[in-house]
Amino acid sequence: MNGLPARRLLLVHAHPDDESINNGVTMAKYAAEGAHVALVTCTLGEEGEVIPPELAHLAPDRDDTLGPFRVGELAAAMKELGVTDHRFLGGAGRFRDSGMMGAPQNTRPGAFWATGVDEAAGHLVAVIRELRPQVLVTYDPDGGYGHPDHIQAHRVAMRGAELAADPAYRPELGTPHAIAKVYWNRVPLSAVEEGFARLRELGAELPFPGLATPADVPGVVPDGRITAEIADAEGERVLVEAKAAAMRAHATQIAVDGPFFALSNDLAQPLFAREYYELAVGESGAPAGERERDLFAGVEA
């Protein structure tokens, strides 16, 4: 298949840094195993808040150069994960970060949220038909926590997968391809509760000024919704250390301290060493009642 490896994984995310927080372990695992791991990021994250004071001038209300700076952060993060195929939907800067839900930026010209789903999905169809992934990872319908760009990324990913398989849709974009399995990023409630219990135990030694809450973690669901989990081999930390390094590369957005991190609100959250998924499309490759430990389980090359 155009010289690509037998296993091919595609991830669709809203902004630079989302991929490392949600899927850093997963991306590092499959890249190290020789699978083709491709990341499509939908915006440059131009509306993000900037953590380091010395970089405050990048912010959208000042120089408005945060987007190009985050392109470099993303490249550094992908190097830490061993991922060489990372692209922006429609090209860098094609769609602008829409800001938080209800912000004026939601409706500005070029905002990702204000773009028609089919218009944006067409760009993803071209990628899908080129790379022919068996597995796609993206957000749930709420985008994990209701951010407009995350919701739109979910819609575009799901619609792109649908259109890519349709022989009648834009044949000039390549031969139709049906993705075998689509996963949504999830976190089981038990993992969130355990992570925050560890943070509370630190008390005065908490690595950040404040403590987030489980409600701040995107995509939390009852444990029974989880169908797959990806983690380091027993006793190893290679993948989670790669994830932490990738998160540190997004220095304008994330501060990492050991097994914890904080966003611009300076509230500590657990850095999850295991990553969890809900199978939304396709058949599980695990026995009934068990979680998959391989997203490609049951998939033919």
Image (spheres, rainbow, N blue to C red):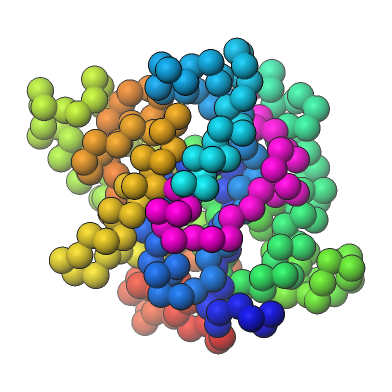
Does the magenta segment cover residue 287? no
Position in image of residue 203 (x %, y %): 10, 26
Q: Nearer the viewer, residue 222 or 94?
A: 94
Residue 217 seen from this side? yes
Residue 220 seen from this side? no
The image quadrant that residue 275 belongs to is: bottom left
In the image, residue 3 sits, relative to residue 185, either above or below, namely below
**Relative to 163, 214 lies left or right:** left
* Residue that appears at 24% across and 36% down: 257
**Relative to 195, 82 lies left or right:** right
Looking at the rendering, the stretch of residues picked out in magenta corresponds to 77-102
The secondary structure that most of the magenta stretch takes on is: loop
* Residue that appears at 35% across and 52% down: 243
Q: Quadrant of the C terminus?
A: bottom right
Position in image of residue 42 (x %, y %): 65, 45
Of all residues, the one furthest to the top in this rendering is 62
